[in-house]
Image: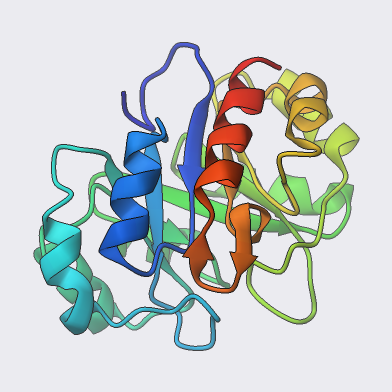
Amino acid sequence: MSLSDPIPPLRTKICGITNLEDALMVASCGADALGFNFFPQSKRYIDLAASRGWIARLEGKIDRVAVVVNAEPEELAVIRESGCFEWIQFHGDETPDYCRKHGGERWIRAIRVKDQRSLSLASRYETAYILFDAWSETGYGGTGARLNWDIVREYVLASKERHIILAGGLTPHNIRDAVRIVRPHAVDVASGVELEPRRKNEYLVREFIRLAATA
C-alpha cells in the first residue's frame, strides 16, 4: 500500500527515521510511509549525503517522505534529484507559491494548529494532502504536544476533497480515540513510538499500527 491510496484502511506514517535497521523494522510492521527529517535543528535530523545510500535501499518497500523546514531551493533540488523520496513534506513557514514551485509531483503541507483559525490556512495550498500537527513554541513538530482533535474533526467533515494526516502527540495509548474522533486519511507518529530519542521501538510501532487500524 501507499500513503496516497484513496480508500480505507487508514494509512500510517512513522516519522523521524534515522537508520536502516529501524526503517526495515517499521516497514515489516506494516507502515505505509517513513519520514526522514532534514531540518538541522531537529533531534531526529539526518544528513542526506550520509544517509542516501541506505534510504535508496528502501525503494519499492514503502513510501519515503523527505521532511523539510524552510529549506533553500537548492537543498530541495538535491532532495528531489536524489531519487530517494516519493514525497516532500513542508513543515515550516513555506508559502503556497514556494510549495507549488519546489514540491515536485507529490507533496504534503504540514500546518501547526494553534487554534481553529489555523485550519483555514490549508485552503491556500494546492495539494490534497494536509498534515495537522500541534502548535509548539519549542519546535517544528516531533515535540509530543497534542492538538485539539475536535476542531480537526470539524475540518475533516467539511473538506471531503482533502486527505488529512493527523499528527501531534499520538501514542499507542491514545491513537484509537484520536482516529475515532477525527477519522483522518492517515496518522503520523514520531516520539510516540520511541523509548529513547532517534530509535523506534518495535513493540510500540506494532501496537500503534494495530490499534490505529482497528479503531
Can residue 77 be seen here? The reply is: no
- Give 80 or 53, whichever is nearer the viewer: 53
Residue 124 in the image, given as x and y percentages of width and height: 57, 49
**In terms of image quadrants, where is residue 142?**
bottom right
- Residue drawn at point x = 78 percent, y = 32 percent: 178
- Give 28 or 128, whichever is nearer the viewer: 28
- Residue drawn at point x = 49 percent, y = 66 percent: 199
Q: Quadrant of the C terminus?
A: top right
Residue 96 in the image, given as x and y percentages of width and height: 48, 59
- Give 16 or 100, whichever is nearer the viewer: 16
Can residue 150 be seen here? The reply is: yes
Q: Residue furthest bottom?
A: 41
- Residue drawn at point x = 43 percent, y = 57 percent: 89
The color scheme shown is: rainbow
Relative to 79, is 34 above or below? Answer: above
Residue 164 in the image, given as x and y percentages of width and height: 59, 34
Query: Seen in the image, is 104 located left or right of residue 13?
Result: left
- Residue drawn at point x = 72 percent, y = 46 percent: 170
Q: Quadrant of the N terminus?
A: top left
Query: Seen in the image, is 177 located left or right of residue 212?
Result: right
Query: Seen in the image, is 141 located left or right of residue 64?
Result: right
How many discs mark residues in the rendered view?
A: 0
Relative to 110, is 181 above or below? Answer: above
Relative to 124, is 184 above or below? Answer: above
